[in-house]
Image (cartoon, coloured by chain):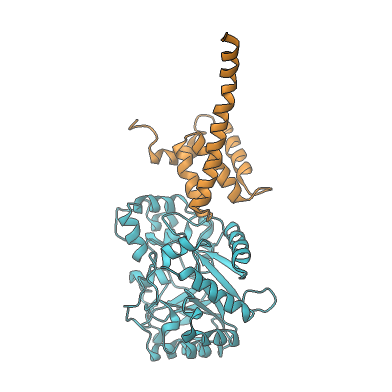
Chain colours: A orange, B cyan
Amino acid sequence: MGDYYEKKDLEDFENIGEYAPDLGKKYFDYYGEAMKEAGLSEREKALIALVVAVTQKCPYCIDAYTNQCLSLGISPDEMTEAVHVGAAMVAGIVLAHSTQMRKIIKKKGM
Amino acid sequence: MDGPKISPSFEEMVCAPLRASAIETLQVNMGYRCNLECRHCHIQAGPQRTETMAEGVMEECVRALSAHAIPVVDITGGSPELHPSFPQFVEACASQDRRVLVRSNGVLLAGEAYGHLLDVYARNRVEVILSLPHVDPRITDRQRGPGVFHKVIEAIRMLNLRGYGSDNTGLSLNLVHNPAGAFLPGSQKALESLYRLALRERYGVSFNRLFCITNMPIGRYLEYLHRTDNYEDYMRTLVKAFNPESLKGLMCKSMVSVAWDGRLYDCDFNQILGLAIDHGLPGHISAFDGQRLAARDIAIGDHCYGCTAGSGSSCQGQLA
């Protein structure tokens, strides 16, 4: 894994439109619009982004949004509280999918 | 600046020399002595520091004010309250009919020995600027020392009782946020909302504005960056966040910083780095040449990235 997920790679993110500039621009316009303060505050959006980053296990996004949360004065307690929401959701999603398992167990069992 | 070379250098990034356009603020550093030893302090101020402005230098500052139409006097330190002639200096500046700002950690104001300063401030309509890095007491105390947060809250409460921090009294109480770590400050608007809500709901105190200031890679903060292996990452973040829009409002373009010994600098940071006003200009308050200083070229270095990152940073908060 040594060559993957290097911190400096995050700086290359702004170049993702290199081979598809129109799509890259559309993406960044959309990203900027979705992330800016509107009905939800910058803090709320940063916390949502952090939780998505952790649950999706993206090291670049975890780096970016941990820093963003710190910059916005979000305390480690609040970040951890938000991550637990993500953890509870992921646990719930896993358990909810065991419904399929239970259905099959019941179907196959005697 | 210690550490690996920054690329591009600030000089390369801005291409043309930075030039002052006016002198709107005379910032006076009364000395490096302080009641606190904050972990981020670029001045490395503390109780053991002995640098203190002499009476003669203070008189020269007042003389420069009376001879030049500089609208703002910004008094700082260390902790300026510790200077024995601080109240008299405040009165002398205010008597020149200038807007007088005092920057402080606020802790001393909460104690009996310095409580009389609250009246000095109110009587002279001094704009008070207190440092409060975070609304979480643990985070503030980690940066500034145990018990500091609650003393600052007490100082704010006492200032509120004198009319500071309300919209309709004309007595300004502004707070300063600076990050407690190796990251940049977020949006001033968002942080001001957080502070306003938290301080009102948890402590019943109010303030006028929040200024977000980026930590400069100088002094104790630089030591912290090196010690924690954050220096390169922090500098890369500053360089990546360079915002040309911030150049227009840089504080060095409209102020002169006077050190405790009367030497002149483009800003408080250059003062600590020993980057004196140069280009042949008289560099001491006793030879203050307002006309030439107002159009001087500014001494720059890679630390200047601290004032141009993101929304920019100045003593009055974000710029762009």
Number of numbered discs on residues: 0
Is residue B119 or residue A27 the one in the foreground? B119
Image location (x, y in percent) of residue B129:
53, 74
Residue B242 visible here: yes
Is residue A48 or residue B63 the one in the foreground? A48
Image location (x, y in percent) of residue B103:
49, 75
The residue lying at 44 percent from left, 91 percent from top is B59
Is residue B267 or residue A54 the one in the foreground? A54
Residue A52 visible here: no
The quarter in which the N terminus of chain B is drawn is bottom left
**Could you say which quadrant of the image residue B219 lies in?**
bottom left
Judge from the rendering whether residue B190 lies leftward or rightward of residue B8; answer left or right: right
The residue lying at 59 percent from left, 88 percent from top is B123
**Could you say which quadrant of the image residue A96 lies in?**
top right
**Could you say which quadrant of the image residue B191 lies in?**
bottom right
The quarter in which the C terminus of chain B is drawn is bottom right
The residue lying at 51 percent from left, 56 percent from top is B244
**Where B189 falls versus A57 (above or below)?**
below
The residue lying at 57 percent from left, 39 percent from top is A28
Is residue B315 or residue B209 the one in the foreground? B209
Judge from the rendering whether residue A72 lies leftward or rightward of residue A11; answer left or right: right
